[in-house]
Image: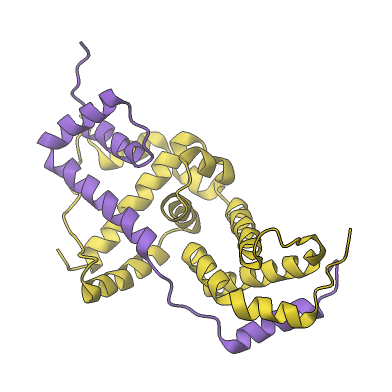
Amino acid sequence: MTNSKITCKKAVDLISKKEEGKLSAFQRFQLWRHLAECSLCRRFSAQNKLIAKAFGLRQPVEKLTEKQKEEIIENVLGSKPGQ
Amino acid sequence: MERTNLSETEFRKWVEDHSDLLFHYAMKRVGDEELGRDLVQDTYLAAWRNRDSFRGESSVKNWLLLILKTRIIDHFRKLNTQAVVLEISPENDEGTFFDSEDHWRKGMYPSSFSVNFQNEIEGRDFFKVFESCGKKLKQIQHAVFVMKYVDDLDSEEICKIMGLTSSNYWVLIHRAKVQLRACLEKNWIGK
């Protein structure tokens, strides 16, 4: 039976790969076991999820002004092919 | 091929109807206003020049979005990854986060903080901090995060686009997270 204990470095690696759904059943077990006893890696994992979520949720506030839209129209219609 | 003969009036409507959406889409991914505007303009320019090839099989909106997506990926592709890759020397890097036993090095401990996104005010305040911290990331780090977390691309696809090896990719991601985390820890008080 392989030793299922892993280091923090390995756990961090597995946490990142888990985001992509790339863990084997055994790796999932290794990670689960490590997280059960390592509060630092639990924190890392929680922060990781938070950063991922925040990136997905963020909404840009910038908007195009009417003038800028007008400029786009002018620039495109006024352009010559091959320019 | 039959000419579709798109009039300038119709083109104007394309801009009126879809430019807000396109700009929003671009800004979510590049985070720079001028660049965002350029990408939108390039998209319309390409659409106008290739208007004959638009067959109405998809909606105008989806067609424009497809052009924009391609432009954004092209922009990411052109970023110079070399400078970042040079900085990443695996031996040094691993040592920064972990000690000789591969345990978290003191001073690199992840600290705890959280955000309640359900709380409107807390969420809004957090995103102000998050945006300014995000701006401190290198363009490449930002691009990789966007592909990963906004567009849900696989690490292999991202590596291909950016011309990164898998090991450089993981170090880059990890570093960017540590950097972002440090900035959030410092500026975000909601613990």
Examine the rendering and report whether any part of residue B109 can be seen.
no
Which image quarter: residue A27?
top left
Q: Position of residue B21 (x, y in %)?
A: 54, 72
- Image position of A12 (left or right of B141): left
Residue sitting at the far left = A37
Q: What's the residue at 16%, 30% (across, down)?
A: A33
Q: Colour of chain A?
A: purple
Q: Position of residue B168 (x, y in %)?
A: 46, 39
Q: Position of residue B26 (x, y in %)?
A: 54, 66
Of B82 and A40, nearer the camera is: A40
**How is this picture coloured?**
by chain
- Image position of A42 (left or right of B182): left
Of A56 and B170, nearer the camera is: A56
Can you say which quadrant of the picture contains the N terminus of chain B? bottom right
Q: Is residue B93 above or below residue A79?
A: above
Which image quarter: residue A68?
bottom right
Q: Is residue B4 above or below residue A64?
A: above
User: What chain is colored yellow?
Assistant: B
